C-alpha cells in the first residue's frame, strides 16, 4: 500500500440503546480502503457490517445509536466529530452509498430524474436544466435504455435491476472517490446480479473510485473484491487479499463460512452433507471476556474464553484474530 | 417403473388483470403455462428460476392453496383437482409446505407447542392432549430444538430456529411430500447448511419426497435428484441433477449456471451474459418466451413457434428449437 489510505477506520465502536440494554453492534473495527481498491466487508446477519458502513457516513439514527469511540479518517480528516453541515458536503460528493433495496431507498413520489437532479443541484451547484441533463447522462451511463425519455419515470415503473441502476446513477452523479455498496445485489436475481456487478466494475474503472462492498455472499467477494475484511459479532476476525483468504483462511470462522457454501461442482451429490458451523451467533447483548466465536469453535481452548485475541499474523497482509489458528503453528 | 407419487400435467394458472384502472381490456398473466413433471416416492425435484417465473405458484397450485386454471395433478393415485373440501383436507395430511419467510409464516400469538400441535388436532392425530404434547416434544427434538421450547413464542427464536419450527409443523402430520418454497433462501449460509442437512436427514429417515423451490442453482444441486428450470411460466429444461449441471442444454440454463458467482478467486469464468431482463408476463414474447434474451436465437422460427419439450438424452428434456 502506498501513501495515506482514502478511508481509515480506527477502533470504531458503535452502540444502540434499546429497552433490552445496550447493543454493541460494532466493537472495535479497524479497516482501510485505498484509492481505487474494492474491499469487501463480509459477515452474516447481525455481525455489524452494515452499521460499520453506515457509521462512516453517519447514517445511523442518533439516538438511539452512538459512535462511542474510534476515528473515521477520510483522507486523513476525522469524520466523527464533524458537524452535520460539514458531513453533508462529504456525502455524495466524496463518499456515496447504495442500498440493498432500491425500492425503499428511492422516493416513490418523485421521478428518478428529479431525484438525481436534486443531488446534483445541491452538491455541484448546477442549475435546474443542467442538473436534469446530468441526470440523463448518468442514466445513460449506467445502461438505462432510452434515458432521455425515461428520466421522467417514477421508481415503480422500473424493474428491480433497473432501480438498482438508478441508485447507482444517483450515487455516482457527483463522481465520489468512494462508493459504499451495502448488499447491492442481494435482492436481485442471479442473472441481474451478474449485470450489476459488471456495471460496478466498469464504473469503478471509468471513475477511478474505490468501493467498500458489504455482502454476505462469498461468491460475490471472490468475483468483485481485491481485499476482504471478515466480521463476526461486531469485530473484525480476519482480513487479507481475497486470494489468500480463500486458499488459506486462517480463522476457524472464515474456514467454516467458506466450507458451508453449497458449490456447483462440489461433487457432493444428493446424499452428501454440507459442512456446517454448529450453533448460532451469540446474543447481541452478550459481552464475553474472550473470543466471541469460542462457543462454536472446533479449536477453542481455555485461553480463548479468558481473553480476546488481537489481530496478528506472520504476514502483515493477512491478519487474523485467533490464538490457535493452524497457520500459526511453529514452523518445522 | 412404479407410478410416481406426484404427477403434474399441463398445469396452468392465469391471474386476470386490467391494463389500467378504468380499462375494459381484460388481460391475463399466465403465471404457470403448461407445466408437467413427476416426483417419485422419496425423491426430490428441484425447481429453479428467477423471480416471476411461476415456480412458487406451481408449488401452491399443487396443494391447491391457489386454485389452478387447468391441467391435472395426480397425487398417490388421486386426482387432486377433483377433490371436494373434505378430500382436500385429507390430502393436506399427505402434502405439506414450508415457506420462505420464517418471520411471516408462524403465528406470533401462538406458542411453538400450539403451532406444531394445531395440525395434529385438525387431523385427529394423537390419542389426547398429553399424547400430542409428547409427539410435539419428539418432533422438536428431531429438528434440533429442545422440548422445553414448546412454551415459547416465535419471536424468541432466530431465523434458522424458526425455520426448524416450520419443518416440525410440516412433519407433525407425517406427510409424504413437502413443498419447500424457498425454505432456506432467507437464511445465512452457515445456518442454511444446517437446515439443508436436516432436510436431507429427514428424507433418508422418513422417505419424504420434496419439491424444492429455489432461485439458487447451487443450493438446489445439493438436495435434488431431478431439476426443472422454469422461465416465464414454462419449464424449459428438466433432467437428473448431475446431468443438468454437466450438460445443460437450454441457453437459459447455461446462462443461469454461469451467472452464479463462484467462491474461488481467480476462477472468474467467462460469463455467458444475458442481455436485458425478464419480459412483462402480461405480454410475454411470442414463440419461445426466451428468444428476446437468447444468445443463440434463430429468427423467425424462435419468435413465432413455441418449442415443445423433447427428449435429448435419457431422462433429459429440453424445450428449444435449436437444442436437443
Image: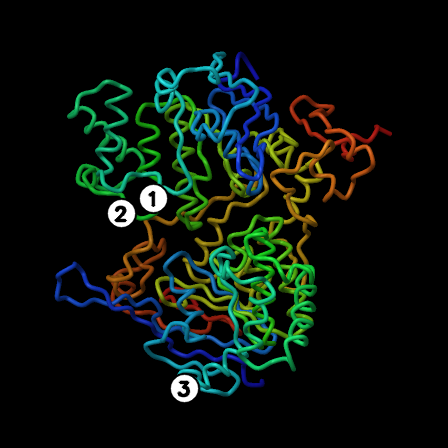
Location of residue A25 with respect to B296 vertically, above or below: above
Q: Specify whether A284 is left or right of A157.
A: right
Assign the C terminus of chain B to one quadrant of the image: bottom left
- Which image quadrant is residue B64 in? bottom left
Where does residue A272 sit, x and y in percent of width and height? 68, 60
Residue named by callout 2: A156
Q: Which residue is mark 1?
A: A103
Foreground: A20 or B287?
A20
Q: Nearer the viewer, residue B95 or B114?
A: B114
Q: Chain of mark 1?
A: A
Residue with the most extreme right position: A332
Discs 2, 1 touching: Cβ within 8 Å: yes
Expressed as whole percent of the image width and height from the top left, the position of residue B136 reads 65, 69
- Left or right: residue B306 versus residue B172 is left
Q: CA distance from mark 2 to mark 1?
A: 8 Å
Question: Residue at left 16%, top 25%?
Answer: A128
Amino acid at each position: 500500500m502506498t501513501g495515506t489510505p482514502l478511508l481509515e477506520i480506527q477502533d470504531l465502536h458503535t452502540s444502540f440503546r434499546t429497552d433490552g440494554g445496550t447493543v454493541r453492534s460494532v466493537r472495535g473495527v479497524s479497516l482501510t480502503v485505498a484509492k481505487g481498491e474494492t474491499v469487501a466487508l463480509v459477515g452474516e446477519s447481525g455481525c455489524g457490517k452494515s452499521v460499520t458502513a453506515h457509521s462512516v457516513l453517519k447514517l445511523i439514527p442518533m439516538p438511539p445509536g452512538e459512535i462511542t469511540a474510534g476515528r473515521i479518517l477520510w483522507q486523513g480528516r476525522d469524520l466523527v466529530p464533524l458537524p452535520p453541515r460539514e458531513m453533508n458536503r462529504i456525502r455524495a460528493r466524496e463518499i456515496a452509498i447504495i442500498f440493498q433495496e432500491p425500492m425503499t431507498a428511492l422516493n416513490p413520489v418523485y421521478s428518478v430524474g428529479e431525484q438525481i437532479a436534486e443531488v446534483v443541484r445541491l452538491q455541484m451547484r448546477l442549475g435546474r436544466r443542467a442538473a436534469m441533463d446530468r441526470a440523463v447522462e448518468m442514466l445513460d451511463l449506467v445502461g438505462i435504455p432510452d434515458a432521455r425519455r425515461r428520466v421522467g419515470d417514477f421508481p415503480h415503473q422500473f424493474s428491480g435491476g433497473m432501480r438498482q441502476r438508478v441508485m447507482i446513477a444517483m450515487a455516482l452523479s457527483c463522481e465520489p472517490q468512494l462508493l459504499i455498496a451495502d448488499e447491492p445485489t442481494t435482492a436481485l436475481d442471479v442473472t441481474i446480479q451478474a449485470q450489476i456487478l459488471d456495471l460496478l466494475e466498469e464504473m469503478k474503472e471509468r471513475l477511478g473510485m474505490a468501493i467498500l462492498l458489504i455482502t454476505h455472499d462469498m461468491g460475490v467477494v471472490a468475483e468483485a473484491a481485491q481485499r476482504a475484511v471478515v466480521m463476526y459479532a461486531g469485530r473484525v476476525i480476519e482480513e487479507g487479499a481475497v486470494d489468500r483468504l480463500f486458499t488459506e483462511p486462517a480463522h476457524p470462522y472464515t474456514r467454516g463460512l467458506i466450507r458451508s457454501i453449497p458449490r456447483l461442482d462440489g461433487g457432493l451429490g444428493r446424499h452428501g452433507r454440507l459442512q456446517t458451523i454448529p450453533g448460532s451467533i451469540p446474543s447481541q447483548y452478550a459481552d464475553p471476556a474472550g473470543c466471541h466465536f469460542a462457543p462454536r469453535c472446533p479449536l477453542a481452548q481455555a485461553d480463548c474464553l479468558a481473553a480476546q485475541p488481537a489481530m496478528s499474523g506472520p504476514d502483515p497482509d493477512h491478519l487474523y484474530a485467533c490464538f490457535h489458528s493452524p497457520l500459526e503453528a511453529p514452523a518445522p | 417403473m412404479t407410478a410416481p407419487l406426484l404427477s403434474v400435467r399441463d398445469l396452468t394458472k392465469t391471474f386476470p388483470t386490467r391494463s389500467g384502472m378504468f380499462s375494459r381490456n381484460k388481460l391475463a398473466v399466465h403465471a404457470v403455462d403448461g407445466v408437467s413433471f413427476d416426483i417419485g416416492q422419496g425423491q426430490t425435484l428441484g425447481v429453479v428460476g428467477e423471480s416471476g417465473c411461476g415456480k412458487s405458484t406451481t408449488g401452491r397450485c399443487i396443494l391447491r392453496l391457489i386454485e389452478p386454471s387447468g391441467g391435472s395433478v395426480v397425487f398417490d393415485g388421486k386426482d387432486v383437482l377433483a377433490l371436494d373440501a373434505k378430500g382436500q383436507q385429507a390430502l393436506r395430511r399427505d402434502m405439506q409446505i414450508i415457506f420462505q419467510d420464517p418471520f411471516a409464516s408462524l403465528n406470533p400469538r401462538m406458542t411453538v407447542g400450539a403451532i406444531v400441535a394445531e395440525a395434529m388436532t385438525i387431523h385427529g392425530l394423537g390419542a389426547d392432549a398429553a399424547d400430542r404434547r409428547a409427539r410435539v416434544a419428539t418432533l422438536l427434538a428431531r429438528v434440533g430444538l429442545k422440548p422445553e421450547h414448546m412454551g415459547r413464542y416465535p419471536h424468541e427464536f432466530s431465523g434458522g430456529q424458526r425455520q426448524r419450527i416450520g419443518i416440525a409443523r410440516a412433519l407433525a402430520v407425517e406427510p409424504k411430500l413437502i413443498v419447500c418454497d424457498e425454505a432456506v433462501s432467507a437464511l445465512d449460509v452457515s445456518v442454511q447448511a444446517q437446515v439443508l442437512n436436516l432436510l436431507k436427514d429427514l428424507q433418508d429417515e422418513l422417505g419424504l419426497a420434496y419439491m424444492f423451490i429455489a432461485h439458487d442453482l447451487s443450493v438446489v444441486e445439493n438436495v435434488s435428484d431431478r431439476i426443472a428450470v422454469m422461465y416465464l411460466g414454462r419449464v424449459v429444461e428438466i433432467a437428473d441433477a448431475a446431468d443438468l449441471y454437466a450438460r445443460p442444454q437450454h441457453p437459459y440454463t447455461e446462462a443461469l449456471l454461469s451467472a452464479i458467482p463462484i467462491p474461488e478467486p481467480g476462477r472468474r469464468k467467462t460469463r455467458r451474459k444475458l442481455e436485458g431482463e425478464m419480459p412483462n408476463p402480461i405480454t410475454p414474447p411470442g414463440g419461445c418466451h426466451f428468444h428476446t434474451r437468447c444468445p443463440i436465437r434463430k429468427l423467425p422460427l424462435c419468435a413465432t413457434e413455441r418449442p415443445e419439450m423433447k427428449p435429448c438424452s435419457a431422462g433429459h428434456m429440453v424445450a428449444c428449437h435449436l437444442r436437443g
